Amino acid sequence: VATMANEVILLDFWPSMFGMRTRIALREKGIEFEYRDEDLWNKSPLLLETNPVHKKIPVLIHNGKPVCESTIQVQYIDEVWSDKNRILPSDPYQRAQARFWVDFIDKKMYDAQRKVWGTKGEEQETGKKEFIELLKTLESELGENTYFGGDDFGYVDIGLIGFYSWFHAYEKYGNLNIESECPKLIAWAKTCMQRESVAKSLPDSEKVIEFVTEIRKKFMLE
Amino acid sequence: MAERSEEVKLLGMWASPFSRRVEIALTLKGVPYEFSEQDITNKSPLLLQSNPVHKMIPVLLHNGKPISESLVILEYIDDTWKNNPILPQDPYDRAIARFWARFVDEQVYVTAMKVVGKVGVERDAAVEATRDLLKLMEKELVGKDFLGGESLGFVDIVATLVAFWLMRTEEVVGVKVVPVEMFPEIHRWVKNLLDVDVIKKCIPPEDEHLDYIRARMESLKLKSV
């Protein structure tokens, strides 16, 4: 019988920009993991058992012990597999700044982007303005750096890049041209996409568009 | 002890649970700091400059460098001053602590605000929802003196929001949101907290606090009419 090696399972949902964060972190560290796609309209007993409080993906299960919430998972992964490819900065002040920006993304991005593809009329127009404002704030934080972490790909990059796989869907349904509004941010995203961990963890934009189309039909937006 | 002079300044607000939790952390670690009471209805240039993104308190200024968002500040304090650690050492335990802290701030706080801000049926629904969430916290306390285990930790500091803000609103709204019969563990935990000197020192004085909550409730009610 094999000794208890590191058993890592990720309960996830392929279009989730939150799940993408954990996938990227695991791949950055070269951790072998079992990916399980959940049907959110028919959640598995394991999901309900491992995240009884929120019943949400992603859930990271490490040697049987569940960790919930994508940002908590990324920090956990960084702390357990601390020997390579550090995700969070080692300096406490830089670390605090990184946490601040991921918190900002968490507080603002999801709701804003939801309005872009998931609403109509005035609500959508407001949502679009908010969304572009957010991207511009982030773009200005990026400045002239390659990554939000500076020279190194890190926590904030991981926190944001998943949303990039949804950009074509935002552009289609929100009638936006993100590159013309935030060219530096798009350049940053393309740089991130060159990393294997990112390319493997983000779904194809076309698939995301199909998914959003289905959701819109479901909520009778068509 | 650091050789160079450490300048620690907190832009805060006396009645804010988010500001007070930072004070608890600094006091627990014996970090001397200057407290600067902020008028949130007329924000100071320093506040706006230090937290341009959210324009909110608390903001910690350490040697002039600002850190915003109370949970981020708490982690920064723990990373910088290593004595009396707030977060556990083990990565799994840290993940659990972070989970419960977010739970308090993103779930409990949001529904509890509705208890104060709404009336009638909407308030009743908010009370129910808050109780459902607190039942989870109740379970966590079984067999423990504190949410952090044997001693005060990260989640306890964050959850002072429940002990000294949510539970104090009961007097003002006239509803026992957290009755002792339903939540004996939480009540026991509050007593444990009050035995800790740092907590006693850092929570807002009860009478003034109740007056403040009363006034806020009135203004929230007026807004929702």
Image (cartoon, coloured by chain):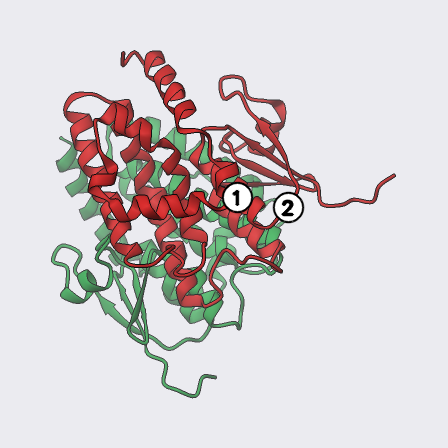
Chain colours: A red, B green
| Residue B169 visible in the displayed image | no
**Left or right position of B162 against B59:** right
**Left or right position of B220 against A221:** left
Q: Residues within 10 Å of mark 1 (few under 14, many from 20)?
A: few
Q: Residues within 10 Å of mark 2 (few under 14, many from 20)?
A: some
Per the image, label 2 sits on a secondary structure element best described as: loop
x then y, percent, for residue B25 = 43, 65
Q: Quadrant of residue A43?
A: top right
Q: Tell me the quadrant of the picture where the N terminus of chain A can be found.
A: top right
The residue at 43%/23% (across/down) is A207
Q: Chain of mark 1?
A: A
Q: Residue furthest right?
A: A1
The residue at 62%/54% (across/down) is A80
The residue at 28%/55% (across/down) is A141
Say which of A67 and A180 sits in front.
A180
Q: Nearer the viewer, mark 1 or mark 2?
A: 1
| Residue A156 visible in the displayed image | yes
What amino acid type should be assigned to the residue bearing mark 1? Glu
**Left or right position of A87 against B91:** left
x then y, percent, for residue A161 = 40, 42
Say which of B90 and B214 sits in front.
B90
B122 over A222 or under it: above or below: below
Count up the numbered dots.
2
Q: Residue furthest bottom?
A: B3
A174 over B48 or under it: above or below: above
The residue at 59%/50% (across/down) is A29
- Residue beneath disc 2: A31
Per the image, label 1 sits on a secondary structure element best described as: helix
Say which of B55 and A219 sits in front.
A219
